[in-house]
Image (cartoon, grey):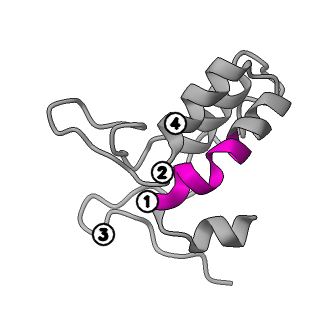
Amino acid sequence: MKDAYNEAAPAGDQANFKSLIVAKLMAFGQDAASANALAGALSPDIQPIDLSRPSGFLNGRKLDDDVITAELHLIFGSNAALNDDHVDANDKPFLATFPYLAGPHVQ
């Protein structure tokens, strides 16, 4: 379903994929209410931002936000074996000026 999800318009995410997301979250141990709330917060697959609130994951994103670990924690909670990708820092620092991201790795 990855290709179908990636190719679909975000406006249809809840109608087309929310039940699948809820089922997967429940398979990972979430109760139905929590799985439904989390699926609702994470779909549609867009990055909302409320300029009246501080920026950070689930309200926009800062470059240094550890989004994967944050999402794993939302899914697996306090299960330390599963709630962290253990990638705690970039291997190259961000640049001080635009485009801010370090250059690509070249071999």
Task: Give the Cα separation between the discs numbered 3 and 4.
Answer: 32 Å
Residue drawn at point x = 61 percent, y = 56 percent: 16
Query: Which circle's residue, 2 or 1, is located before the other in the chain?
Result: 1
- For disc 1, the marked residue is 11
The reply to whether callout 2 and callout 1 are in contact (CB within 8 Å) is yes
Task: Give the Cα separation between the discs numbered 2 and 1.
Answer: 6 Å
- For disc 3, the marked residue is 99
- Numbered disc in front, either 3 or 1: 1
Query: Which circle's residue, 3 or 4, is located before the other in the chain?
Result: 4
Q: At which x and y percent is residue 24? A: 78, 39
Which class describes the residues within 10 Å of circle 2: few (<14), some (14-19), or many (20+)? some
Task: Give the Cα separation between the discs numbered 3 and 2.
Answer: 27 Å
- Numbered disc in front, either 3 or 2: 2
- Numbered disc in front, either 3 or 4: 4
Residue drawn at point x = 37 percent, y = 45 percent: 61
Q: Is residue 37 visible?
A: yes
Q: Nearer the viewer, residue 3 or 104?
A: 3
Highlighted magenta segment, given as a residue range = 11-21
Mark 1 residue type: Ala
Q: Which mark is residue 40?
A: 4
Question: Going by the picture, which residue comes out furthest to the bottom?
Answer: 107
Mark 3 residue type: Pro
Query: Which circle's residue, 3 or 2, is located before the other in the chain?
Result: 2
Task: Give the Cα separation between the discs numbered 2 and 4.
Answer: 8 Å
- For disc 2, the marked residue is 44
